[in-house]
């Protein structure tokens, strides 16, 4: 993390700690808004393969959701799903590789990301988007999801018809929302349990489900897809310990690739990871 980023996070954390002294509920509300608001700027120049795509657009909750399609029409299709504060263009390597293997490839910028409209996003909204994409452009033979996209995909698939012929790749995925909340609270220095309780109340009021329910470990019990789960031991965003617990559950439809030294974002750029993903889906 850059020094400027650390200073910015430290200053933001200080403001939240001061706010929590006056109102735990308001501090939790502002923290939820902060962690539902993606950051990041679009690149000055898109990868060449992105510019070769057919643009796609549909509406979700009154916002335009924009994406890309390559190699249409083909019998088998793959959907690529990026993580939080990311965008579809970052996975252009995979889109090109799958298209070259004869697949139709689709990738959308999630709500409030990239070229899609909106200001905030959460797992419920992202999973709604995925279900809409499947309805409009599916069915899909395979899915590739990174980080936050993996949690949203698991929530979508457990309520979407699929079978063992469906292939899913999860890379550095958010496994447990409770862990993500703990990381967020730690980042802001909000150690007060009352703030955390108010944060969890917001999630429950939003969806009628507790934070614990938003768990891939729970959701995979309702998934029939064949899954390749890739995670790095040194991931400082999504704890590998959560993934290891799923591994220890010994699901017959999940195989794991545990890496070292790649972290949360470099992992999907690694050549060995790329080869494994393309072989699995292709």
Image (cartoon, rainbow, N blue to C red):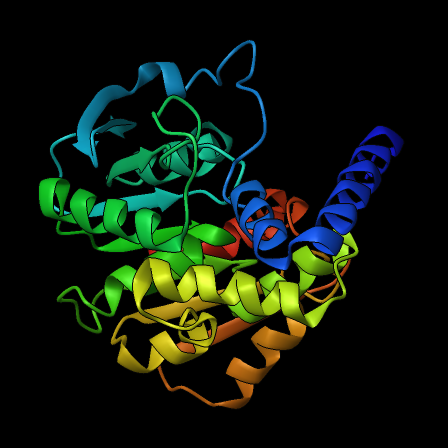
Q: Looking at the image, which is closer to me, 81 or 276? A: 81
Left-right relation of 53 to 230: left
Residue furthest to the front: 22
Query: Would residue 151 be visible to someone looking at this image?
Result: yes
Query: Would residue 146 be visible to someone looking at this image?
Result: no
Left-right relation of 175 to 150: right
Q: Looking at the image, which is closer to me, 252 or 192? A: 192
Residue 216 quadrant:
bottom left
Residue 77 is situated, as x and y percent measured from the top left of the image, at 21, 45
Report the residue at 62% width, 66% height from top. Answer: 196
Left-right relation of 194 to 73: right
Report the residue at 85% width, 28% height from top. Answer: 4
Q: How many marks?
A: 0
Report the residue at 89% width, 33% height from top. Answer: 3
Residue 282 is situated, as x and y percent measured from the top left of the image, at 33, 52
Residue 190 quadrant:
bottom right
Q: Is residue 16 placed above or below 257 in the rendered structure?
A: above
Residue furthest to the top: 44
Report the residue at 64% width, 45% height from top. Answer: 265
Residue 261 is situated, as x and y percent measured from the top left of the image, at 77, 57
Image quadrant in which the N terminus is located: top right
């Amino acid at each position: 993390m850059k020094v400027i980023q650390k200073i910015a996070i430290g200053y933001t954390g200080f403001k939240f700690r001061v706010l929590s002294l006056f109102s735990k509920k308001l501090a939790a509300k502002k923290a939820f808004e902060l962690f539902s608001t993606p950051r990041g700027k679009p690149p000055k120049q898109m990868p060449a393969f992105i510019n070769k795509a057919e643009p796609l657009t549909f509406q979700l909750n009154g916002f335009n959701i924009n994406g890309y399609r390559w190699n249409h029409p083909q019998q088998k299709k793959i959907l690529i799903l990026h993580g939080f504060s990311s965008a579809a263009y970052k996975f252009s390597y995979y889109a090109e590789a799958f298209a070259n293997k004869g697949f139709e490839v689709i990738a959308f910028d999630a709500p409030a990301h990239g070229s899609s409209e909106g200001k905030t996003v959460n797992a419920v909204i992202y999973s709604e988007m995925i279900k809409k994409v499947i309805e409009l452009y599916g069915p899909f033979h395979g899915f590739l999801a990174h980080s936050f996209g993996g949690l949203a995909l698991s929530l979508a698939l457990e309520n979407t018809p699929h079978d063992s012929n469906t292939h899913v790749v999860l890379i550095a995925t958010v496994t447990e929302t409770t862990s993500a909340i703990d990381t967020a609270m730690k980042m802001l220095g909000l150690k007060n349990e009352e703030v955390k309780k108010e944060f969890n109340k917001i999630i429950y009021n939003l969806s009628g489900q507790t934070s614990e329910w938003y768990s891939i470990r729970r959701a995979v019990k309702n998934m029939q897809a064949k899954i390749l789960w890739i995670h790095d031991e040194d991931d400082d965003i999504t704890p590998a310990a959560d993934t290891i617990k799923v591994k220890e559950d010994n699901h017959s439809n999940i195989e794991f690739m545990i890496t070292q030294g790649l972290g949360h974002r470099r992992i999907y750029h690694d050549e060995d990871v790329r080869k494994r993903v393309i072989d699995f889906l292709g």
